[in-house]
Amino acid sequence: MCFYDGKQEAVISDRVINGIAYSLSDKNAFIMYTELPNMEELKVAWSDMEDDGWEWAVQQAIEEECSMVIAAEGTSAGTVTLDDDMYIYNTMYSSDDGKLYMYLVDEDGEDGMIFVTDTKGSNAGKIEEYDNDAEDAQMLMANKNGLYYLKDYEDGGGDLYLGDQKILEDVASIAEIGESGKIVIRSDRDYDDSTCMVNLLDGKKNTEVSEDVNSAEFAENGTAVFLVEYDYRRGEGTLMYFDGKEPRVLDDDVTGYFTRKGSNFIFSE
């Protein structure tokens, strides 16, 4: 496996089995992969070959000696070591600070835990505990603030956490507004009338925008336009505007709206 930075090619490893996670963003480039051991140094016990046969014993020895390696910018940076009974279920990468979050489970898919590691520098590959009680978790997004994830996830919703801080309960999804760092949160989803509650998270400040929202678009300055109490039979609802602090009614009996320049159409039920 090689890395090309647009000018020259660098060989990362000639013993790569498969890639586990990677990012080739403009901010950071890394890959975590499984690497075979040095076959010339591989040792197989004679007793294992007698019990299980030569091929099986060699295969088991290779699997036990395989390692997970992180390479950043074309250079092998560090080895990731996990407990033998834990497996990587999912990963989430933050290109803002080069941190990789890993959701680990046991062989039964239970006892979920979240760990984090750097992907470059002297701490690359050294894992730290992020949440040791993350049963039924869903990792949603990672940025410079940390990892946003749902715990106790069930029936399309869960409790939203940022690190050890609980943000909001019964959250269905989140979305970042451009590169502003502001997060739109959808919670209390009602499948019967296709509505939800919408909150805006700016750093650690959580502001309720409105309930009974059917569709919404947000600009990076935190303002929003959205429809509430939409009647699908009539094809009309109430158009609202959020100035970053509180909502106000713009018009009633509105069929739809055009998105503003520089805004993000976050969702439409």
Image (tube, rainbow, N blue to C red):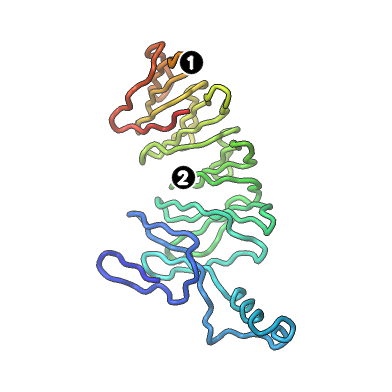
Image coords of residue 36 (percent x, y): 52, 75
Circle 2: residue type:
Asn
Using the image, determine if residue 192 lies above or below residue 159: above
Q: Residue furthest left?
A: 7
Image coords of residue 156 (percent x, y): 59, 36
The numbered dot on residue 233 is 1
Instruction: State the residue in front, 176 or 18.
Output: 18
> Few, some or many C-alpha atoms within 10 Å of disc 1 (few <14, some 14-19, many ≥20)?
few
Disc 1, SS: loop
In this figure, which residue is indicated by the disc labeled 2?
145
Image coords of residue 213 (percent x, y): 48, 23
Image coords of residue 224 (percent x, y): 39, 25
Determine the CA span between mark 2 and mark 1. Answer: 42 Å
Using the image, determine if residue 205 lies above or below residue 25: above
Q: Residue furthest front?
A: 233
Disc 2, SS: loop
Instruction: State the residue in front, 144 or 19.
Output: 19
The mark closer to the camera, 2 or 1, is 1
